[in-house]
Image (cartoon, rainbow, N blue to C red):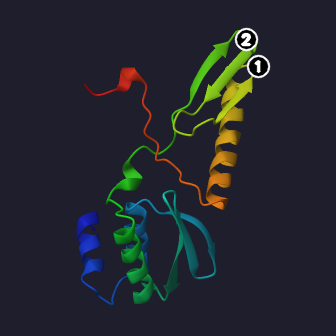
């Protein structure tokens, strides 16, 4: 089902929403499945502190949980298709004479960078730093920016 049409179905207040429709709608607004335990599926969104629980009950979503999803969308002014923006953060890798090795930094995550003796090592370390940065921001309810940085050669004029 087309995302906008699916969203309109949820907005209509229908009590006959399939679990797969509710989760597809949540994901189209930028929510990501964090974990599942039995029938409970916990979704997170990088821009909001609340967690979203969607329970699969015989293939259906509970109406009150669909309402909670819609309330979060409205409360945080989430936009349809947010997941389809950039999927990950850009990483710059450059050689530093001063450090005698490679530096990898993630411009969208302020002060998130790493060192390596090779480009590959710097990249692997930057990926570890990114995960630690994001985990810390989430645990402390700090804002997490959407991936937006693009090098000048990719900018649309």
Residue occupying the point 48% across, 58% down: 47
The quarter of the rendered structure image containing the N terminus is: bottom left
- Counting from the top left corner in percent of width and height, residue 110 is at 58, 37
Q: Mark 2 points at which residue?
A: 98
Viewer-nearest residue: 134 or 54: 134
Q: Is residue 95 left or right of residue 68?
A: right
| Res. 109 image quadrant | top right
Q: Work out whether mark 2 precedes mark 1 in sequence or the reverse, and give the earlier one.
A: 2
- Counting from the top left corner in percent of width and height, residue 74 is at 34, 70
Q: Name the residue under label 1.
A: 117
Viewer-nearest residue: 143 or 6: 143
Q: In this view, does 5 lie to the left or right of 117?
A: left
Q: In this view, does 34 lie to the left or right of 76?
A: right
Q: How crowded is mark 1: few (under 14 residues within 10 Å), some or many (20 or more)?
A: few
Residue occupying the point 41% across, 72% down: 72
Can the viewer see residue 2 in this picture? Answer: no
| Res. 10 image quadrant | bottom left
Q: How crowded is mark 2: few (under 14 residues within 10 Å), some or many (20 or more)?
A: few
Can the viewer see residue 122 in this picture? Answer: yes
Labels 2 and 1 touching (C-beta < 8 A): no
Residue occupying the point 42% across, 30% down: 150
User: Label 1's element?
Assistant: loop
Residue occupying the point 43% across, 25% down: 151
96 in relation to 29, above or below: above
Viewer-nearest residue: 108 or 142: 142
User: Label 2's element?
Assistant: loop
The quarter of the rendered structure image containing the C terminus is: top left
- Counting from the top left corner in percent of width and height, residue 100 is at 76, 12
- Counting from the top left corner in percent of width and height, residue 32 is at 51, 62
Distance CA(mark 2)–CA(mark 1) = 13 Å
């Amino acid at each position: 089902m087309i995302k906008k049409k699916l969203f309109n179905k949820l907005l209509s207040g229908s009590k006959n929403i399939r679990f797969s429709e509710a989760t597809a709608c949540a994901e189209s607004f930028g929510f990501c499945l964090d974990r599942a335990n039995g029938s409970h599926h916990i979704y997170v969104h990088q821009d909001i502190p609340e967690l979203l629980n969607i329970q699969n009950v015989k293939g259906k979503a509970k109406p009150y949980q669909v309402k909670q999803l819609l309330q979060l969308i409205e409360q945080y002014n989430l936009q349809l298709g947010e997941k389809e923006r950039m999927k990950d953060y850009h990483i710059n890798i450059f050689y530093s004479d001063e450090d005698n090795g490679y530096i990898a930094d993630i411009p969208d995550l302020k002060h998130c960078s790493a060192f390596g003796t090779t480009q590959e090592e710097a990249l692997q370390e930057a990926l570890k730093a990114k995960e630690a940065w994001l985990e810390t921001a989430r645990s402390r309810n700090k804002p997490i920016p959407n991936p937006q940085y693009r090098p000048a050669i990719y900018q649309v004029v």
